């Protein structure tokens, strides 16, 4: 059974169409991440699921109930806000009680629900405090606690970690993952951080310009992005895009790109070649981790190309290097032990089995 | 559950199959609550203005009548010598009052901004006249101006026996008695606004100017004051507004006298309407006050909107 | 040697800077003191004169240190002094003002809070235009509304009554109170209201449980503003009401302009202070909020 079904949802603000026909579905217990750059419509979509924003057209079902006309309070949802939206004049306990009081939940039930959730989130010691007396991380926990006491059908998270500092954000990410594992509730999680989406979600919807670009499992999205936007947005540093031309090299299909010593031939794998379907011009995409120093950890399907190294950025665990390829820069991810140095020209190996080919006109994956 | 999935699966449209009645009513609650206030404001702002405008165009005298008379009342108003005195007074008063109250207010604000001790004590002294009505201020100052036992008496007693300070009894200078009292009442207000402005200036700019070697004086002149120009404008507009509405102070201080020398437009309206039974002409005079306010406020609002847009545009 | 000379100049520079600092401080405090005197003297004059005897006032003038002390002026001003032929002192007018100012302040503040809440948190198409129209009321000169009010109050039987003035001040006050509250509520995050809606709270519950508990700062500002404004108002008081139904400001003018008898400055001083005391008390006890109201009312 699906916990959330979204069919052809559209939203107009005046003449501006911010959502252009969204279809999504969350199976019970699933963790769906809506990810995309700011302005892509992900928060609007979440607000529409919550009932805080009207629907221009389309249908939203929570469980098997059409909720288009249902008020937020009757949708059986709970939401965690980016700003946490804790009621500043109430203690933590009162914050958690508020929703249950509004719904007329019996007092002893309220008590036991708060006790259960406070124990789960380890916030028992904070119950008598006001939000102003809490740290950012504690507020975050309380905001989740307020959502959890309600035991709703659907959890909505609106960029809940973006107000935390980097270290805390990673910790809370892990916490949310654990929590979801334990509670097992269907969750829709909006974020602009693709790492959060990758680490947390069972399926990710990548949104851009009011449309879902791709809706699939994280690894599928990472390995076979539907188009260049998804390929570029998911993964950091971004996938390298190199314009190229399809040529035949000794009977083998290959892509020819501009290299430092003129055109360079990169032979394609058979499966890529089979999908080409007569394309002449392509965009060749390769992720930084599939760019290596030729001759190191050699695998099959390696194509080599020479490139001068322009910038080297060590991060400790790995070293990024920016190399020049014609009028294009490409990034590679290296083991610090074998990282190139600035100014040297090295021979790179592209792992062709992980390469992606895009159509330059439609920007779609070939 | 009021809407079943099957009935509306084909084409859902928010109007064809609307929300339950309870929810629809709930949506209207805010509007219902707002309606009395909207009606009251509409009555006050539009109906009353239209009404007074109409009376100003009618031949009303003692009681409102609705015989249309065109601009007759305006013509007779502008032909009246007393109205001439009233608006001349308004110009004189506005010019001195706005400029001096701003100058003194700015000076006090700058003094208080010098990290002085007991800041709130000083502020309390400069601001208390604002809590008091113009009536009280005017009454007390009329005593101080009184030559037989006010300032003049005090100075003469101190030994300067031919000292004269008789503003309120002199037709020519009585207006300045009102100016001085107005400044006394309002410069604290200008101070409060300027001080709020000075305190809102980004501290880093000031530090940067100090590191650049600017003196305190130069820092104020070149860095801080230019960044609060909107405050100058706001203070000027508010004070102008006060001066156009001046009524209580003139009544309590000089009661338009000596003679009619300190008549203001607002006091003249009162006089026409309720002492002389010239309702039509009084309404015309009050429309002139409204126009004067509009002349000040409409450009200012346009400026504000423009300014906000520009700020928003810059980030 | 060189070192000694060096420290010498530093000392001299330091002394010069120090002298300059002291001079500037003297100038600053000197100016502040002079201006304070100008501001405070009128208040002292009235307070002193309310305790001096009349003969002493006429002998030494109004501006003088008291040489005598008596309290009689105060009860006289309160209950026996004649104003416009009515010899009951200020008390009737004082209570008129109290009866007017308390309901008008409470009602207009509550309306403003509701309006501000709706216009910031329950916006609907056209709500911005409605807000702008309400805002116009802030700038309207009272003279425009005099005739219409006189007519309307006459029609509904509230002419020459304190209730009429309450109605007038409530309606005139809506603009200001709505402006204050709306601008304050705009700064409360919308997410709080959204969270409360998801938590199942409706329009009223959100107002009582979320917004009102956050409102004391703005409600204090609004109440102080309305209280001092209505207490100090003169035009409507003198035009719409007459005789013993007038508020205290009108009585003060009547008292100082009935020039037939000799000027009893002691009693008049006490009367003026009775009229000025309530807003002064509000100012001294709510100073911070009073100033906040002033600056907000002006700059918005």
Image: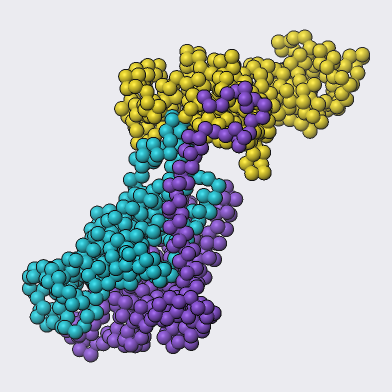
Chain colours: A yellow, B purple, C cyan
Res A225 quadrant in image: top right
Report the quarter where the N terminus of chain A lies. top right
Count of picture labels? 0
- The correct choice, above or below, for B143 with respect to B108 in the image is below
Report the quarter where the C terminus of chain A lies. top right
- The correct choice, above or below, for A68 with respect to C122 in the image is above
- Is residue B146 found left or right of A31 in the rendered image? left
- The correct choice, above or below, for A295 with respect to C233 in the image is above
Q: Position of residue A43 (x, y in %)?
A: 57, 32
Query: Residue A201: in sight, yes or no?
Result: no
Q: Position of residue C75 (x, y in %)?
A: 11, 68
Residue at x-position 85% and y-position 19% = A276
Residue at x-position 36% and y-position 58% = C170
Res B99 quadrant in image: bottom left
Res A347 quadrant in image: top right
Q: Position of residue A182 (x, y in %)?
A: 47, 13
Residue at x-position 56% and y-position 26% = B3
Residue at x-position 50% and y-position 14% = A184
Q: Position of residue B169 (x, y in %)?
A: 29, 86
């Amino acid at each position: 059974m699906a916990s959330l079904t979204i069919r052809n949802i559209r939203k107009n603000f005046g003449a501006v169409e911010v959502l252009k026909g969204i279809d999504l579905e969350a199976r019970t217990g699933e963790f769906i991440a809506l990810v995309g750059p700011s302005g892509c419509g992900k928060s609007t979509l979440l607000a529409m699921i919550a009932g805080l924003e009207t629907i221009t057209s389309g249908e939203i079902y929570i469980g098997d109930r059409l909720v288009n006309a249902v008020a937020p309070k009757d949708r059986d949802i709970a939401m965690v806000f980016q700003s946490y939206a804790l009621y500043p004049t109430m203690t933590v306990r009162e914050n958690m009680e508020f929703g249950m009081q509004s719904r007329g939940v019996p007092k002893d039930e309220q008590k036991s629900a708060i006790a259960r959730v406070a124990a789960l989130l380890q916030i028992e010691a904070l119950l008598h405090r006001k939000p102003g007396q809490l740290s950012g991380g504690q507020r975050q926990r309380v905001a989740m606690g307020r959502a959890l006491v309600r035991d709703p059908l659907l959890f909505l998270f609106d960029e809940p970690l973006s107000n935390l500092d980097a270290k805390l954000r990673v910790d809370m990410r892990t916490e949310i993952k654990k929590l979801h594992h334990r509670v097992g509730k269907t969750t829709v999680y909006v974020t602009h951080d693709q790492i959060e989406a990758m680490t947390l979600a069972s399926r990710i919807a990548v949104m851009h310009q009011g449309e879902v670009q791709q809706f699939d499992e994280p690894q599928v999205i990472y390995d076979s992005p539907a188009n260049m936007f998804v390929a570029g947005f998911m993964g950091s540093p971004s996938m390298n895009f190199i314009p190229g031309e399809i040529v035949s090299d000794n009977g083998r299909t290959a892509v020819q790109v501009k290299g430092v010593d003129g055109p360079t031939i990169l032979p394609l794998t058979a499966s890529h070649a089979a999908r080409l379907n007569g394309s002449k011009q392509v965009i060749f995409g390769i992720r930084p981790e599939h760019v290596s120093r030729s001759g190191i950890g050699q695998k099959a399907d390696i194509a080599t190309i020479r490139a001068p190294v322009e910038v080297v950025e060590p991060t400790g665990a790995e070293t990024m290097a920016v190399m020049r390829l014609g009028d294009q820069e490409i990034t590679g991810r290296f083991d610090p032990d074998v990282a190139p140095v600035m100014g040297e020209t090295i021979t790179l190996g592209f792992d062709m089995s992980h390469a992606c080919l895009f159509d330059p006109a439609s920007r779609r994956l070939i | 559950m009021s809407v079943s999935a099957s009935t509306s699966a084909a084409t859902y449209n928010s109007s064809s199959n609307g929300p339950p009645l309870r929810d629809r009513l709930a949506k209207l609650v805010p509007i219902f609550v707002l309606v009395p206030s909207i009606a009251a404001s509409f009555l006050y702002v539009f109906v009353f203005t239209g009404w007074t405008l109409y009376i100003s165009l009618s031949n009303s005298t003692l009681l409102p009548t609705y015989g249309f008379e065109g601009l007759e009342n305006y013509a007779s108003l502008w032909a009246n010598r007393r109205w001439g005195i009233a608006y001349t007074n308004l110009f004189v008063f506005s010019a001195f009052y706005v400029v001096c109250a701003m100058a003194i207010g700015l000076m006090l604000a700058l003094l208080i901004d010098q990290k002085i001790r007991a800041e709130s004590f000083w502020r309390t002294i400069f601001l208390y006249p604002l809590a008091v009505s113009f009536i009280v201020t005017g009454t007390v100052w009329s005593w101080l101006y009184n030559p037989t036992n006010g300032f003049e008496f005090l100075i003469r007693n101190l030994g300067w026996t031919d000292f004269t300070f008789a503003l309120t009894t002199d037709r020519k200078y009585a207006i300045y008695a009102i100016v001085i009292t107005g400044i006394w009442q309002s410069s604290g207000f200008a101070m409060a606004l300027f001080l709020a402005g000075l305190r809102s200036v980004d501290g880093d700019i000031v530090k940067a100017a100090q590191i650049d070697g600017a003196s305190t004086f130069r820092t104020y002149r070149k860095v801080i004051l230019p960044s609060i120009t909107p405050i100058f404008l706001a203070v000027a507009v508010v004070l102008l507004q006060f001066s156009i509405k001046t009524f209580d102070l003139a009544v309590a201080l000089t009661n338009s006298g000596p003679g009619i020398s300190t008549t203001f437009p607002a006091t003249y309206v009162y006089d026409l309407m309720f002492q002389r039974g010239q309702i039509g002409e009084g309404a015309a005079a009050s429309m002139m006050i409204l126009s004067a306010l509009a002349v000040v406020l409409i450009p200012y609002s346009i400026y504000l909107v423009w300014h906000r847009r520009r700020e928003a545009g810059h980030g | 040697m060189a070192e000694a000379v060096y420290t010498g100049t530093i000392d001299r520079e330091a002394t010069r800077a120090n002298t300059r600092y002291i001079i500037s401080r003297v100038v600053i405090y000197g100016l502040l003191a002079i201006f304070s005197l100008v501001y405070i003297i009128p208040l002292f004059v009235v307070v002193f004169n309310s305790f001096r005897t009349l003969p002493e006032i006429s002998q030494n003038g109004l501006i003088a240190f008291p040489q005598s002390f008596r309290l009689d002026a105060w009860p006289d001003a309160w209950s026996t002094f004649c104003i416009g032929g009515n010899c009951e002192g200020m008390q009737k007018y004082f209570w008129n003002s109290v009866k007017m100012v308390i309901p008008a302040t409470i009602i207009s503040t509550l309306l403003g809070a509701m309006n501000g809440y709706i216009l910031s948190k329950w916006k609907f198409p056209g709500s911005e235009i409605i807000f702008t129209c309400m805002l116009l009321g802030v700038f309207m000169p009272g003279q425009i509304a005099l005739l219409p009010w006189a007519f309307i109050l006459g029609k509904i039987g509230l002419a020459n009554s304190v209730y009429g003035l309450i109605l007038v001040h409530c309606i005139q006050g809506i603009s200001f109170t709505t402006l204050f509250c709306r601008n304050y509520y705009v700064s409360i995050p919308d997410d709080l209201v959204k969270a409360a809606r998801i938590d199942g709270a409706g329009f009223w519950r959100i107002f009582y449980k979320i917004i009102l508990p956050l409102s004391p700062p703005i409600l204090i500002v609004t109440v102080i503003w309305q209280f001092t404004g209505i207490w100090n108002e003169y035009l409507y008081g003198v035009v719409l009401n007459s005789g013993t139904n007038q508020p205290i400001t009108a009585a003060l003018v009547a008292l100082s302009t009935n020039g037939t008898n000799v000027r009893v400055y002691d009693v008049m001083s006490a009367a003026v202070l009775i009229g000025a005391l309530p807003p002064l008390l509000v100012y001294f006890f709510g100073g911070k909020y009073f100033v906040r109201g002033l600056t907000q009312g002006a700059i918005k």
